[in-house]
Amino acid sequence: MLIRVTAFLFFSLLLGVSTQAQSENTQQSPAELPAPATTTAEQTDSRKWLLRYQFEPMTKLRYRSEESMTLRAEVGEQQRIDASRSRQVRCYTVQQSAPDGSARLAMQFEDVWMQKQIDDQEPVEFRSTMDPAKVPQIYRAVAHSLQGAAPTCNISPLGVSLTQDRIPNTGSTETADNDDNGKDEQSAASFLMPLPEQPVGPGESWKEEFTVPVRGSRELTLRITILRSFRLESVTDGVARISFRSSVNSPLRSPAIRSQLIQATPSGEFQLDLASGRMLSRTFRYSATVIGALGPESLLSSVGTKSESLLLPETGALGN
């Protein structure tokens, strides 16, 4: 669009000057006319950047995440509020890298803290350093998932898993960890957001599609397609700011199925350092409501945020 506007203005200016020159019987050649000046903003907007992750062998990438999620269920005049919070530090070690820029990484949890509160009841807490005998029942699956060898994965410089089909990163720790023993391998393979294959400039976008499983019935599992769009918003001081949004790309008629996807379509943004090829920070935002998910006159809503940031090597674990 900018190129078209600039060309139009140039053509109009050239036509106006040419008409004026003819009326004054001058012999000035069009080649001698001054070219329209290009502003700094136009030069900046026309630039494109090749976005890539970079992995150096034996490098450790440590991320601290904080999440707060509130799930509210209303059936008639009855209401239940499930509020959860979590903080954790994960360490990704680059075990080896390949000439094409891909790498093999191993992920370990350095520290995990979680809390869940239902209505006005006393909050239930979990800490990865707890005595196994004192772990609350609702967090025993999480505690079990933190044991054992560090899961590994192969990732391309575009941030896509090479060892299996790309596992979507919804950002929700509560959903991923509690539903399937932590799903450590998924966390290891999906901690980066996908980047475009071609260079992009501010305002340009790219997309990814992935499927998530939902229960259609006791015997039937459905695969629902999620579409996630990314947009390069700006590049300032060598840091790219990229926004994203998600939407369900499959026809959904059942409120029960829509309720299982209430935390699968977050929006947010992340920052990428172009020189080091490292993700500096990432934010997920959730806000969704499903009517009729729990029967007639029912409402289910989820609101929350999750933020992640790259830690300096000397930064310690959680403070609480």
Image (spheres, helix red, strand yellow):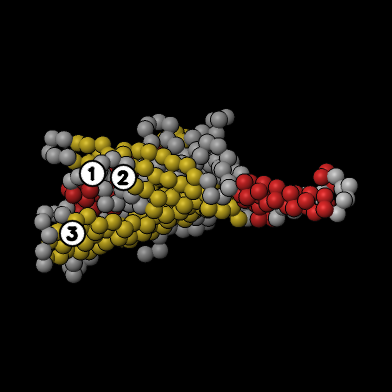
At horizontal 44% and vertical 34% (from top left) the residue drawn is 154
Q: Where is residue 24 in the image (x, y as percent from the top left)?
A: 86, 54
Q: Estimate how packed mark 3 is, as few (under 14), some (14 to 19) or many (20 or more) residues with alpha carbons within 10 Å.
A: many
Q: Position of residue 198 (x, y in %)?
A: 55, 37
At horizontal 11% and vertical 54% (from top left) the residue drawn is 295
- Marks 1 and 3 sit apart, C-alpha to C-alpha, by 17 Å
Q: Position of residue 219 (x, y in %)?
A: 13, 35
Q: Name the foreground residue: 169 vs 248.
A: 248
The residue where tag 3 is placed is 299
Q: Quadrant of the C terminus?
A: bottom left
Q: What element carries label 1?
A: loop
- Marks 1 and 2 sit apart, C-alpha to C-alpha, by 8 Å
The residue where tag 1 is placed is 252
Q: Name the foreground residue: 66 vs 218.
A: 218
Q: Is mark 2 on a helix, strand or loop?
A: strand
The residue where tag 2 is placed is 248
Q: Estimate how packed mark 2 is, as few (under 14), some (14 to 19) or many (20 or more) residues with alpha carbons within 10 Å.
A: some
Q: Is mark 3 on a helix, strand or loop?
A: strand
Q: What residue type is labelled 1?
A: Leu
Asked if residue 92 can be seen in this view, the reply is no
Residues at badges 1 and 2 in contact (C-beta under 8 Å)? yes
